[in-house]
Image: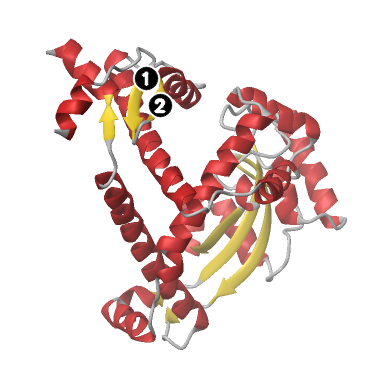
Amino acid sequence: MIAGCSATTPVPDDVVARINEVDITTAALEEQYTRNILGVDPLPDPDEADDLRLQLLNEMITNEILMQLAAERELTATDAEIDVQFNEFKAQYSAERFQELLDEQEITTEDLRVELRNSLTIEKLVNMEITSKISVSDIDIEAFFNKNMASFDLPETFYISHILITRFEDPELNNLEGDDAATLEEARAKADGLLRQIQGGQDFGMMARRYSEDPSTAPSGGELGFQPIESIIGIDPTLAEAVLQMRVGETFSSVVETRFGFHILKLIDRDEGGQKDLSDPRVESDIRQIIFSRRDQMLRSAFYERARNTSSIQNFFAREILDRTF
């Protein structure tokens, strides 16, 4: 009977899905699609575009269901909570760079606040239903260690951070200032200037977030994590030579040039390696995090599926694709 009633319910032309009588519009889906293809070259062909729209719509449906559940439990993020997140995000950038980011994503500050409200609300729901209930016992940790003991027989490793300045403009630039050296001369001068500032007392991590041109490590303050010397040699032998000369906590005295560009290096920590025991706090912490993350991911997926199964979902866009194909 429910299926029969749903089939006869009139559907506005601008609606792509209906979840518990709440509509997702074509305009909302197209807004998400447009954001996801910004800077993509070449643009998706028609089949790829429809596949991406289906994926995005599926995420939007799940998020709508979770927002409805959160509202029922009165867990919707407050304005004060949104203000904290918004201000923390905005404080990472200059006013000009912050506006540039909004323009690049084609969103307004109000759009950003809406996104923050949704993400904070869903996280509050998931934390109440899933994350806060996950426990990892000492027995779990010991069992994992005993099963994977060989993986804790480690080589000597070096925890390094770097600031990379490339000799060319990088379309994937990901630093806070949007600062990008475009030539060899600009890159060398920028690297030398940053090293002088760090030697003068500027925080290495913040300078990496603001100016590094390595898109994968700039957001984390340039951190490359623990690396065996063989891996560092694989990146570039010149980097390995510099790392072996440094003491923990030290920034290398000069800029290191490699085929990737100019590097400023800092040695954060050093581990002698060998067979680690469960009594090592870092081993225990790493295992606890691994087990927790696995359980969290599995239980979130199960929770999302259960939430979908108990909701009324009509995906009109999926129906429209099938109708025009067959």
Residue closest to the eye, 118 or 85: 118
| Among the 4 quarters of the image, the one containing residue 115 | top right
Mark 1 neighbour class, 10 Å CA radius: few under 14, some 14 to 19, many 20 or more = some
Name the disc covering residue 15, or none: 1
Q: Secondary structure at mark 1?
A: strand
Residue closest to the eye, 320 or 158: 320
Name the residue that disc number 2 marks.
24
| Among the 4 quarters of the image, the one containing residue 274 | bottom left
The residue sitting at 66% across, 28% down in the picture is 102
Q: Position of residue 317 (x, y in %)?
A: 29, 21
* Quadrant including the C terminus: top left
Q: Position of residue 52 (x, y in %)?
A: 34, 26
Residue 48, relative to residue 309: is it above or below? Answer: above
- Residue 193 visible, this orientation: yes
The residue sitting at 74% across, 55% down in the picture is 204
Name which residue type carries label 1. Val
The residue sitting at the left extreme is 326
The residue sitting at the right extreme is 200
Pointer 1 with pointer 2, Cβ within 8 A: yes
* Side (left or right) of 68 relative to 322: right
